[in-house]
Amino acid sequence: MDSEMLANYLNKIGIENHIEPDLHTLKQIHQRQHCRIPFENFDVLNGTTPCLSEEALYQKLVINERGGYCFELNGLLSCVLKFTGFDVRPLLGRIHLEEKPSGRGHFINLVTLGETSWIVDAGFGANTPRAPLPVVFNQEISTDLQTFRFIQDERFGVMLQNKVNSGWRDLYSLDMGHVCDGDIAYGNHFTSTNPDSVFVSNCVATLRTDDGILTLLNNRLSIKRPEGTHEIVLDNEPSYFSALKTYFGIELEMPYQQIANCF
């Protein structure tokens, strides 16, 4: 990354002030990227394994105004944070949203500021934390609309949970060990090619709003706000591509039928 790339990125996410490697900047960059660059998997659905080079991520997410999934969104975020001067390293997590946990297929950033480590994740779909999370155990951590906690799990290491009604739900686990480029490449390849991967056979897009989140799963668009959730069924090509542009800022060049095969 260079100064011009950083300037274009900051313009993309709507940051005009001078930035420093401090907690205020970390929260600001995370929040603005989460609002401006959508989580989406249409390239994967189109049979493409995303390229994770710095140049490719910048071109796709900043210049071409597309989104991506965790390896892309958090990969770009990592490049930006490193160039800005943050102490950041990658982690790979197991997802626990289904009955059986996944392999290490979720890419996350760990940022250290002083004595505190922060999970900085802009790529976990509808469950993406709306702020960086300090890695402290058995304490409720609140964002504007969410509540999380970290616990120690004897099998899986550090477990991130979110509060659902009066209970806690496992989201993903981390062993906090060293992650090399090869680990990331393996995870990216498996997640984008394995027939059992949710991203290979479903259309997914999410984008944070000021008071909620937009979620697209196949042909169902959900608009979640504090007062409730409104669902729209996108049942034809014009409505589908119009919704992608209107709600997510995504313009696709792929056949509608390839998308419609998912539903």
Image (cartoon, grey):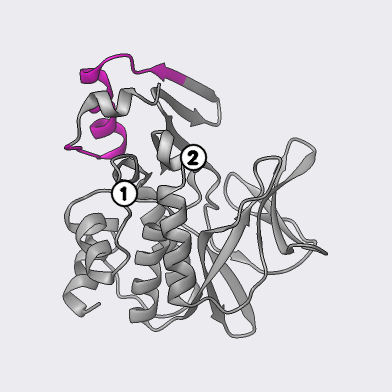
User: Which residue is at the front of the view, 196 or 198?
Assistant: 196
The disc labelled 2 sits on which kind of residue? Val
The disc labelled 1 sits on which kind of residue? Gly
Point out the image quarter for the C terminus. top left
- Identify the secondary structure beneath mark 1: loop
Packing grade of label 1 (10 A; few <14, some 14-19, many >=20) is: many
How many circles with numbers are drawn on the protein? 2
Q: Is residue 99 left or right of residue 49?
A: right
Sequence-wise first label, 1 or 2: 1
Packing grade of label 2 (10 A; few <14, some 14-19, many >=20) is: some
x then y, percent, for residue 183: 49, 70
Point out the image quarter for the N terminus. bottom left
**Is residue 243 a member of the stretch shown in magenta?**
yes
Q: CA distance from mark 1 to mark 2?
A: 17 Å
108 above or below 66? below
Identity of the residue drawn at 31% across and 56% down: 50
User: Which residue is at the front of the view, 68 or 32?
Assistant: 68
Identity of the residue drawn at 34% across and 18% down: 234
x then y, percent, for residue 71: 42, 60
200 above or below 161? above
Asked which quadrant contains residue 168, the reply is top right
State the extent of the magenta-drawn residues as a range: 231-253
Q: Which residue is labeled 2 in the image?
A: 198
Q: Which residue is labeled 1 in the image?
A: 67
- Identify the secondary structure beneath mark 2: helix
**Is residue 16 a member of the stretch shown in magenta?**
no
x then y, percent, for residue 53: 29, 69
Identity of the residue drawn at 25% across and 23% down: 257
Asked which quadrant contains residue 239, the reply is top left
122 above or below 234? below
x then y, percent, for residue 130: 52, 52
Mark 1 against mark 2, which lies toward the viewer? 2
